[in-house]
Image (cartoon, grey):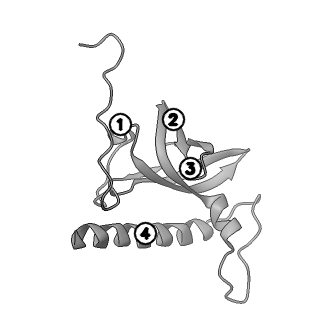
Amino acid sequence: MKSSNATYLIWTLILLLATTAAFSQTDSHQAPPPSGGQAPSLADVAKNVVLGQLKKVDKTELTIAKPDGVEQAVTVDANTKFVGDHGDTITLADFRTGDQVAAVGTVKDRVFVAAQLAKLPPRPGMPPPPPPLPAPGSN
């Protein structure tokens, strides 16, 4: 049980580090980070991070159900890095409906584009996600 809590804590810290990295990558549509050593506000972090349960994967567009129940579309591209729940490099095909995920990225042309998509380890005491359903027409 203690190792599960430690793993969850480590992934939370990794997510915070990834969020910090996302803030260092500004484009012409974003305001520069606050000056004077101020930490970014929660609203600023929310613009760059989407956390929740993976509901759907359709080619390069994912649907993530956030904890507040709102579904967020997230797009991945050739530059997106995919990280497994043990910190290993994986591919988009390794993600399954029901996975808890964290996407770190930016909004470009009104679309959230993930620079990194990570599977989060199951929280202690939570059951694993169900296995994926077979594709229609396959046996």
Residue 36 falls in which quadrant of the image? bottom right
Q: Amino acid at mark 2?
A: Thr
- Going from N to C along the chain, the mark reached first, 4 or 1, is 4
Q: Does 59 appear above or below 19?
A: above
Tell me residue 136's x, y (percent). 36, 14
| Amino acid tagged 1 | Ala
Separation of residues labelled 1 and 3 (CA atoms): 21 Å
Question: From where the camera sits, is residue 79 visible?
Answer: no
Residue at x-position 55% and y-position 72% = 20
Alpha carbon of mark 2 to alpha carbon of mark 4: how far? 25 Å
Which residue is the site of mark 3?
66
- The one nearer the camera, 29 or 10, is 10
Left or right of 81 in this view: 29: right
Q: Please name the residue shown 47% across and 46% down the image.
A: 53
Q: Earlier in the sequence, mark 1 or mark 3?
A: 3
Which residue does the numbered mark 2 point to in the structure image? 60
Mark 4 → mark 1, Cα distance in angstroms: 23 Å
Nearer-N-terminus badge (3/4): 4
> Which labelled disc corresponds to residue 93?
1
Give the residue furthest to the bottom. 36
Q: Secondary structure at mark 1?
A: helix
- Neighbour tally class for label 4: few under 14, some 14-19, many 20 plus, Cα within 10 Å: some
For badge 4, the amino acid type reads: Thr
**From the viewer's perspective, is the residue at label 2 or at label 4 nearer?**
4
Gap in Å between the C-alphas at discs 3 and 2? 19 Å
Mark 2 and mark 4 residues within 8 Å of each other at the beta carbon? no
Q: Earlier in the sequence, mark 2 or mark 4?
A: 4
